[in-house]
Amino acid sequence: MIQRIQTIHLLIASLITGICAYLVYDQSELGEPYNFLVEIPLEVEISLRFLESSLLVTSFLSFIVIFLFKFRKTQLFFCSINQLLLFGIFLVMLYFTIDVDFRSIPYQQLLVLITPLFSVTFIALAIRGIKNDRALIKSMDRLR
């Protein structure tokens, strides 16, 4: 059952969060810390490292959930946890940019802010597919 549509949704969510993790904390040509959210002092660098690592964890979790196709209840649980983590990450990213005028920032920064919401959407689609699979299997068991 690894060829189901929720596999595609989880893979897309994993790729989106992986790209977002790369964009959150990118190294400039000079090797100085730079991020796409806002120009920040170095005191916040630890928070950005935490944000980057949490995005990588959610990306890895989305990828691992693909291989739990035999344990649909566990798959649903980890997808829900992943959704909550991504929504929390979105809120943290929003907190970093709370005092920024959104009309003056470039589109790359807005793209980084929106990508966790895209991942949450794809994980929600995957959850819907997993629930449909569970319903299909329950109906097949009833017929036996």
Image: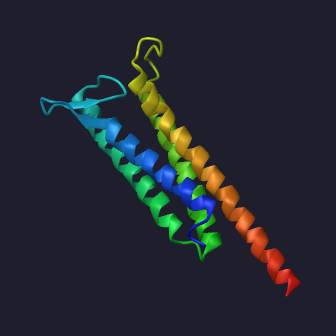
Q: Nearer the viewer, residue 118 or 39?
A: 118
Residue placed at 74% from the left, 63% from the top? 132
Q: Residue furthest bottom?
A: 144
Q: Quadrant of the C terminus?
A: bottom right
Q: According to the image, what is the colour scheme of the structure?
A: rainbow
Count of numbered circles in the view: 0
Position of residue 47 relative to residue 126, above or below, is above
Q: Residue furthest left?
A: 30
Q: In the picture provided, is 76 more to the left or to the right than 144? A: left
Q: In the picture provided, is 57 more to the left or to the right than 122? A: left
Q: In the picture provided, is 136 more to the left or to the right than 43? A: right
Q: Residue furthest right?
A: 143
Q: Nearer the viewer, residue 89 or 125?
A: 125
Residue placed at 42% from the left, 11% from the top? 104
Residue placed at 86% from the left, 81% from the top? 142
Across and down, in percent, residue 20 comes to: 40, 41
Res 22 → quadrant:
top left
Q: Quadrant of the N terminus?
A: bottom right
Across and down, in percent, residue 17 comes to: 44, 46
Q: Nearer the viewer, residue 10 or 27?
A: 10
Q: In the picture provided, is 33 more to the left or to the right than 144? A: left
Across and down, in percent, residue 105 comes to: 40, 16
Across and down, in percent, residue 66 comes to: 52, 65
Residue placed at 46% from the left, 36% from the top? 92
Position of residue 117 relative to residue 142, above or below, is above
Res 101 → quadrant:
top left
